[in-house]
Amino acid sequence: MNILDYLATEFAAFEEKPFNPVDSAALSQFCMVRAEGVVPALRERRTFLGLKTIVENLLSPVGHSARFVDALRAELFDDMFTGLVPGKIKENLFALAASPRFRDMRLRDYLSLFDTDRQMQFAAMTFVHKKEFAYVGFRGTDASFTGWRENFNMVYDAPVPAQEQAVRYLEAVAPRLPKRLFVGGHSKGGNLALYAALRAKPAVQDRIERVFTHDGPGFKAGMFAPADWAPLEGRIHRTVPQDSVVGLLMESHVPPRVVRSTAKGIDQHSVFSWEVAGDDFLYLEGLTDGAQLADAVLTEWLAQFSDEEVAVVVDAFFQAVEASGARDATEVFSGGAKSIALLGEAAKNVDGEARDVLAEALGSLAEVAAREATHGLLQWITPKGKGQAGAAVNPSEDGVSKTPSR
């Protein structure tokens, strides 16, 4: 059973069955819907302090909200769906609109910001169940190159504009929501949800029952100290598929729960491929060897570069992306081997310095991959002692491990 099956068969009200990780994943996918003109917007104003412009959130119009069914009547319905699997996002909307569990939820406080110059792509909205609780959801990466560029920027720049905006959004909507708060998102949306929760004021943090990050990347090394995580201890629910790549990137102090996926490779990033058992996901004991190898390779490779050097590599990479002629990110990041060949050819058309930087970085990546693969083979043929590498993740009773992942 997957998320769409769950939505079609779970009729229990939230009073009968509490809000769960699968509910969060379903709502996180609705955040991928372009809801302009459907969900009442959270407005913004600009105030001027000397020469510095600061964006501050205003409260959304009082009493205005929408339901999932309203999105079905949208004038620009066919253009509402974004991300790497827009067809599944559409199916998810139909399922939410029909579901007795979700259909009467109120949708409000929609905010979508897109700024090519600042390399920012941000969107969020809030889902309210009566006066009982609210889910503050953040959008993952859309199909734009700007959105994907901001993802790459997270590796060397902290915080990026979308992360700062996520904190402002959460603190702006919280005062007018029910006391019980859930916060979540998928992919980049999971990163934004966790960042907002970690940086929110204590008065908001204390109301958060759970933060859900579904295959969301971590944070730049050193961005958060152990003390920063302490206020949310036991309330962060981090999930990744068994072959995760995105969800293992960068640093996190919360080990993940591993979900079984029916897809292969990077396609496991889609939560629609994740298996559901009852009112939760179907969990495995640990990541695959391939996921652990990829994580080790990327971690070691990135550690070779300073922030300034990573910025140069990312610039060179996106020059190649632009030279490829791809119309949007789906043509680059969903094509597997074809994508690699596309970028390889495109790299020949960028300027000499960028081409050399990219070639050197990719050569270094290949060397690290070969070294880690050899090391992994030696570990595999050497008997492991008790407590050595390769042990399965042992989550705490509530599914949230209390120890750093690395």
Image: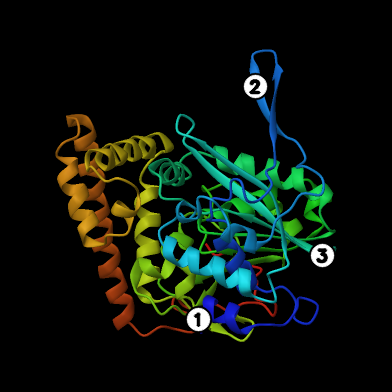
Q: Mark 2 sits on what residue?
A: 53
Residue type, mark 3 in image: Lys
Of mark 3 and mark 2, the one earlier in the sequence is: 2
Using residue 377 as the reference point, say whether residue 151 is left or right of it. right
The image shows residue 325, relative to residue 377, as above or below, that is: above
The image quarter containing residue 78 is: bottom left
Residue type, mark 2 in image: Thr
Which of the pair 28/97 is nearer the observer? Answer: 97
Q: Are marks 2 and 1 in contact (CB under 8 Å)?
A: no
Where residue 190 appears, as percent x and y from the top left, is 57, 57
Using residue 315 as the reference point, say whether residue 71 is left or right of it. right
Residue 275: numbered disc: 1
Q: Are marks 3 and 2 in contact (CB under 8 Å)?
A: no
How crowded is the residue under tag 2: few (<14 C-alpha within 10 Å), some, or many (20+)?
Answer: few
Secondary element type, mark 2: strand
How crowded is the residue under tag 1: few (<14 C-alpha within 10 Å), some, or many (20+)?
Answer: many
The answer for how far apart the CA atoms under marks 2 and 1 are is 46 Å
Q: Nearer the viewer, mark 3 or mark 2?
A: 3
The answer for how far apart the CA atoms under marks 3 and 2 are is 37 Å
Q: Mark 3 sits on what residue?
A: 130
The image shows residue 291, relative to residue 337, as above or below, that is: below
